[in-house]
Amino acid sequence: MNDMKSLFFSYIVVPWLVSASASFNQDSQLILGPVTGQELNGYFTDQVYLKSRRAMREVSHGMNIVANEPDDSLNPEGGNASDLPTCLLCVCLTGSVYCEEITPDMTTVPALPKETAYLYARFNKIKKISTKDFSDYVTLKRIDLTGNLISEIEDGAFSKLMVLEELSLAENRLVKLPMLPNKLTSFNANYNHLKTKGVKATAFKKMGKLVNLFLANNQLEAVPQIPESVRILHLQNNNITEISTDTFCKGNNTYYLRPNLSEIRMDGNPVVLSKNPDSFTCLKSLPTGKYR
């Protein structure tokens, strides 16, 4: 009897245990990914993150994890980022969402966790911002949409964001600006297709907390009204052909000073700044640009 038990254990139980152990190790490897030892600010490497994301998605659908399933299952042919939950595509931390260079393509603003304060959705293929995209996320303080394909933003798209402080729309395809929140401290629209007819002269007038204004590498023909609070103004590489005594100063007030505006870049514009010396009397430093 003992011999039979030994044979049963050796030929049946032991192989089963080895197989189960191998299966467990494969599943663990799938969930955790190969350990590279490289971490940045607490984030896993892309390989680790992608594998864990796939495992989480399968578990959420009640599926068994298959160790040999190819990694391209994350991006089925014809798939779209909108087909998957945001926090399986992006890195979601407390109050912050990072959706950068998402595959499959992210073409619209993703649904965000409630109370998101910081959204980084850079280098995707978002084409349009509608009024409903941010209407439910009144806690947003920073939105970075750099490097997308945005050509249209509906007026009112940012109207409910009462605490928004920083907005970057750089490296997109905008030809005009929407209405912007008055509490912005930093606005970046570098590298777009903005012309003066698409940027109202008073677009920034009521933005009394604006400190950094970046409008470089566009097609502006004139300088919009700049709030008193602005310290850094980038207008380089536009089509600005002239300025006046009212552009930065007040032509009817020779005692007016503007100490906050400490950096103005106008290089790469057709305007010859030396033709208008009275235009800079209120500034503590001359703009960077062409003087002859």
Image (cartoon, rainbow, N blue to C red):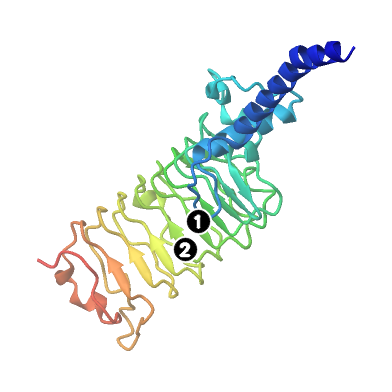
Q: Is residue 52 visible?
A: yes
Q: Amino acid at mark 2?
A: Ser
Q: Quadrant of the N terminus?
A: top right
Image coordinates for residue 93, horizontal then vertical, percent:
63, 51
Residue drawn at 15 percent across, 70 percent down = 275
Q: Which mark is residue 167?
A: 1
Image coordinates for residue 46, horizontal then vertical, percent:
50, 39
Residue drawn at 32 percent across, 81 percent down = 252
Vertical side of 138 occupied by 56: above or below: above
Residue drawn at 62 percent across, 43 percent down = 133
Residue closest to the eye, 12 or 200: 12
Q: Amino acid at mark 1?
A: Leu
Q: Residues within 10 Å of mark 2 (few under 14, many from 20)?
A: some
Q: CA distance from mark 2 to mark 1?
A: 6 Å
Residue closest to the eye, 9 or 83: 9
Residue drawn at 54 percent across, 53 percent down = 143
Residue closest to the eye, 67 or 42: 67
Image coordinates for residue 180, horizontal then vertical, percent:
53, 57
Question: Are the residues at dot 2 and dot 1 in contact (C-beta closer than 8 Å)?
Answer: yes
Vertical side of 173 occupied by 28: above or below: above
View extreme (left): residue: 292
Left or right of 241: which side holds 178?
A: right
Left or right of 111: which side holds 202?
A: left
Q: Quadrant of the C terminus?
A: bottom left
Image coordinates for residue 168, horizontal then vertical, percent:
46, 53
Q: Is residue 108 visible?
A: no
Q: Which mark is residue 123?
A: none
Judging by the rendered image, the residue that carries numbered circle 2 is 186
